[in-house]
Amino acid sequence: MFRLQVFLIVSLGAALGAAVEVQRPRGVPLEKRHFYDESRPFTCLDGSRTIPFDRVNDDYCDCKDGSDEPGTAACPNGSFHCTNAGFRATFIPSSRINDGVCDCCDTTDEYNSGVSCQNTCRELGQKERETLEKMAEITREGFLLKRQLIEEAKQGLQEKQGKLSELQASRKEHEEKVDALRTVKETAEQPEREAKERHLKAWEAQKAALQLEKEKAKMAEVFLELDGDADGLVSVSELQTHQELDPDGDGALTDTEAQGLLSGADKVDSAGFQNVWSNIKDKYVSEVRGPSCLLLKSGETDFWLEVSVHSYPEDDAGDEEDDEEEDDDDDVPEEYDDKVTCHRCRPMCATCSSLPESLEKEISFDFGPSAEFAYLYSQCYELTTNEYIYRLCPFNRVSQKPKYGGSETNLGSWGSWNGPEGSKYSIMKYDHGTGCWQGPNRSTTVKLTCGKETAVLSTSEPSRCEYLMEFSTPAICQEPPSLETVAPETDPHDEF
């Protein structure tokens, strides 16, 4: 882009001086002069036909591409070349020739309309030259700042790499100390751990026995509940008072089905009820509401077990969760409590883990060929419009917040450099922002332009949920040519 600007400055500088006009048919640019040789017939530029040269600019369209009428409005698809000596040459549609409006600053498009036009090319050229020279000056100053940024980035990178090496060495030292202490700790705790394991095994066996007693107590209570006539037997008719035991789920517990649950018998005693219990315990709903307590003795220890007869089986999920606790402290009987000790190993260095990873992440970023964009890291820049406050945090995210209160909207998180080939670092892409209603996730394209200041210049939304942001930074400035390469004010050899 800058080289194009310099080219325009060169052209304008030459144009402002004395110039010799090369003769050619009206409306023909200099680079196509050789196609219009008056000494031979003219061939249409699309090669469609050849005509006598005197039919060029005769106000009649002979060529399909309109190339035989560059200076008239005869061809609808023709174009007229404005020489605009002193300014920039340009093309206009042939339909604008002699239409009463001056389109060329040198007035050449209105040669036969009778309109009085004033040649303003030199004034326009002077203004554009001043604008381009100002842009060139900004580029030069921006590039000087860029060189400083590159030097600062180089020093910063060396410092960060040195700090990272120190932290990594420190972390390694602490890890070695922790490993040594862990070995000492494990060696010291080995007898205690073995004792604890023995106690826990004994406790697990005791818990299993207690659970078996609890199961037997529940079975005995259900037997007494079903034995309505208190004859010491549970009969088919007594079993049929609980329709929830129906095997096929049709709502009726038949005699045959009840006998099946009673293993083919009409009645069973408490001993035979053990087999029945295994068939009905998952479905049985007790008529008794509320818990009862059962005192069991195991060795010298008394255990009060709450036996809920509202439904069976009980939900033992809570017990299982307790069993899985890291140290099983809550499950260990009081008699073992003084023999079990919990040890925890705490980190010796709180920053040994997070800080090196943070530095490694920063160092790994692509900050440009010479790390000229590194100064943008961890910085944020805002632009306030009539409605919103836009916030760009390079290499992090882009956001939008209503000016007069409201929640912030994520317009995209850092994705990658997305410039065209040869200019990769001219565009930043931020993706995966907050989703639009019935639309895609928001995203932002940040176009970088050369400037002495680092600032967000403008924002727009060219497509739904796709934002465009212009961002000025000296880091994108390219080295300009020296002032001596700009053409002088006059060059008698330039032709128009």
Image (spheres, grey):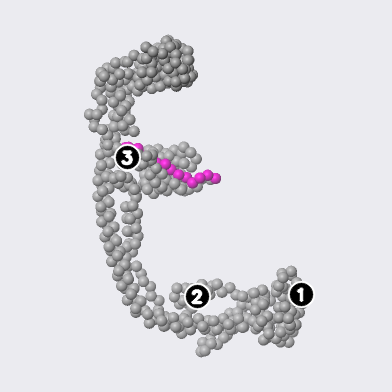
- Specify whether 178 is left or right of 76: left
- Mark 1 and mark 3 in contact (Cβ < 8 Å)? no
Structural distance between the alpha carbons of marks 1 and 2 = 42 Å
- Identified at 67% across, 86% down, the residue is 271
Residue type at numbered disc 3: Ile
Asked if residue 209 is positioned above or below residue 467 in the image, the reply reads below
Name the kind of residue labelled 2 in the image.
Asp
Q: Residue at x 33, y 30 (%)?
A: 4
Label 1–label 2 contact, CB within 8 A:
no
The stretch of residues the image draws in magenta is 438-456
Location of mark 2 (residue) = 323
Quadrant (top left/top right/bottom left/bottom right) for the C terminus: top left
**Residue 436's spot in the image, x, y percent?**
51, 45
Q: Which mark is residue 476?
A: 3
**Label 1 amino acid?**
Thr
Q: Element type at marker 3?
A: helix
Residue 343 found in image quarter: bottom left
Quadrant housing the N terminus: top left
Q: Secondary structure at mark 1?
A: loop
Q: Please tell me whether mark 2 sits on a helix, a strand or a loop.
A: helix
State the image coordinates of residue 159 (x, y, percent, origin top left).
Answer: 25, 53
Task: Classify 306 as above or below 403.
Answer: below
Among the two numbered marks 3 and 1 on one chain, the one whose residue lies closer to the N terminus: 1
